[in-house]
Amino acid sequence: MKRQLVALVSASALYGMVVLAATDGEPRSTQAGGFTTEQADRGAKIFEETCVACHEPDEFIGSGYIDGWAGQTADDLIELIRETMPQDSPGRLKRQEYIDVVAYFFRENGLPDGEAEMDSKSVKEIRIEGPFGGE
């Protein structure tokens, strides 16, 4: 019985370490700065070149837009945009370009930048959380 308990505790500890390694820890908040200024600048350029033909920049700024995403991951937002935009050819951009556009949206909504760029892995761990400072 004692050996089974030790084996169970050891297996549980190992599982916990594997989960932490796989997820890089707890989900992070957008308030922790999940993108860089340079990334948001790239996203702004992509938005101007690709999205502005159909969308005004302020369409994605302010609590009316971003509050609806609170509690979801950055990846949830990116995937919706990737699956539906551009309207004439959804999914046409590279995945990193969609991520950069979302970094631009985050910045424009007053979320803080940080030292690391969002990428395909980190966006799955970043939770969208206010308060939002966009106009």
Image (cartoon, rainbow, N blue to C red):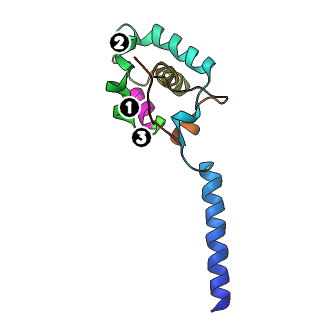
Question: What residue would you read off at disc 2?
Answer: 55
Question: What residue would you read off at disc 3?
Answer: 72
- Residues under numbered marks 2 and 1 in contact, where contact means CB atoms less than 8 Å apart: no
Stretch of the chain drawn in magenta: 76-82
- Mark 1 neighbour class, 10 Å CA radius: few under 14, some 14 to 19, many 20 or more: few
Query: As displayed, is residue 6 above or below residue 108?
Result: below
Front-most of 128 and 95?
128
Element carrying mark 1: helix
Q: Is residue 83 magenta?
A: no
Q: Is residue 50 left or right of residue 14?
A: left
Residue lying at 38% horizontally and 23% vertically, measured from the top left: 90
For residue 3, which quarter of the picture? bottom right
User: The residue under label 3 is which amino acid type?
Assistant: Gln
User: The residue under label 2 is which amino acid type?
Assistant: His
Q: Is residue 80 magenta?
A: yes
Magenta span dominant secondary structure: helix
User: The residue under label 1 is which amino acid type?
Assistant: Leu
Label whose residue precedes the other's in the sequence (1 or 3)? 3
Q: Position of residue 7 (x, y in %)?
A: 66, 80
Residue lying at 59% horizontally and 50% vertically, measured from the top left: 23
Cα separation, mark 2 vs mark 1, equals 16 Å
Label whose residue precedes the other's in the sequence (3 or 2)? 2
Element carrying mark 2: loop
Q: Is residue 14 left or right of residue 78?
A: right
Disc on res. 80: 1
Q: Position of residue 62 (x, y in %)?
A: 37, 21
